[in-house]
Amino acid sequence: MRVLVSGSTGLIGTSLVEALQAANHTPVRLLRSGTRDHTEARFWNPASGEFAEDSLVDIDAVVHLAGEPIADRRWSGAQKTRILESRTTTTTLLANAIATARNPPSVFLSGSAIGFYGDRGDEQLNEISSAGEGFLAEVVRAWERAATPAQESTRLAFLRTGVVLAPDGGALKAQLPFFKLGIGGRIGDGRQWLSWISIQDMVQGIIWLLDNDVSGPVNMTAPNPVTNAEFTKTLGQVLRRPTILPTPKAVMLAKFGRELTQQLLYASQRVEPAALLAGGYQFRRPDLAGALRSNLNKPQ
């Protein structure tokens, strides 16, 4: 299968391209500039709406992962606009191209996030749960709406992604220096739920979705969410470091600002990957300790 991948140089995209090659698929990078290696590529310019008509020729599937990182900067008004438009503009461009293609790809897997559900406490959430409130929920709703023109021409699924655990990027990489020094700790009272997925299951789940007839929202999370306190304790045990002191909220507020801190670090989302489980996907890393040890190369 020839798979067009946007966001192919990001945390998930980089691993996905490697996994597609290992599974005897042909990844085709969708880039704004020249390739850095010999991988086949197509080019676009979402800011100007440029996407060549022949970019979907001989493409069997599209995996759309492009978007401004959520937590790289404080949420100023301008940054919130960048976060929203980097998702809706690119998704609209791809969805419209698929909708009007003479021979459209058979599947469109469009990026999304569990931010759709908002802060829901202990409520157990699956793909039929209602949308929540807040900036992230608004972004995800607009993001998914932008993809809907494609569903008349192809199978469309939304990759509602949780916290991706990978050693070379994302939330885990940001926390590791503190935990290795023995100063990592829970956030707040630690009772908020964290729905995570290993990078291995993230990319293998995407590849599985290419071949299995699943459409609509798909929660890309492991089947065993944990509280922040449990995550903190488990990561400390894997690294053999203490996790006694909680992370001061003042530190989070100073670094990220109030809105980002509240919606990303203190929000609680207890998400079940119901669509993947119902479809028969077999998780490689279903438990947190195993996922952390695997990604950090730690023995059992």
Image (cartoon, rainbow, N blue to C red):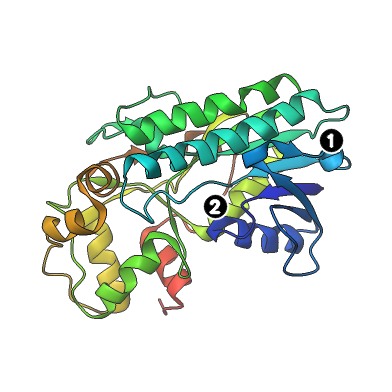
Q: Amino acid at mark 2?
A: Met
Is the residue 227 above or below the residue 277 in the image?
below
Tell me which residue sits at (61%, 62%) in the image: 15
The image quarter in which residue 126 lies = top left
Residue receiving disc 1: 53
In front: label 2 or label 1: 1
Residue 277 in view (yes/no)? no
- 10 Å neighbourhood of mark 2: few (<14), some, or many (≥20)? many
Residue farthest along the top direction in this orientation: 152
Tell whether 289 sits left or right of 40.
left
The image quarter in which residue 292 lies = bottom left
Describe the element under mark 1 as helix, strand or loop.
helix
Of the pair 152 and 203, the residue shown nearer to us: 152
Describe the element under mark 2 as helix, strand or loop.
helix
Of the pair 300 and 61, the residue shown nearer to us: 61
In the picture, the disc for residue 203 is none
- Residue 46 horizontal/vertical position (percent): 65, 41
Tell whether 13 sits left or right of 99.
left
- Residue 242 horizontal/vertical position (percent): 18, 75
Q: CA distance from mark 2 to mark 1?
A: 30 Å
Tell me which residue sits at (17%, 52%) in the image: 190
Is the residue 215 above or below the residue 289 in the image?
above
Q: Amino acid at mark 1?
A: Glu
Is the residue 185 above or below the residue 191 in the image?
below
Marked residue nearer the N-terminal end (2 or 1): 1
Residue receiving disc 2: 202
Quadrant, the C terminus: bottom left
- Residue 295 horizontal/vertical position (percent): 47, 70
Residue 202 in view (yes/no)? yes
- Residue 67 horizontal/vertical position (percent): 53, 46
Tell me whether the residue at label 2 lies in contact with that at label 1, contact meaning CB atoms closer than 8 angstroms.
no
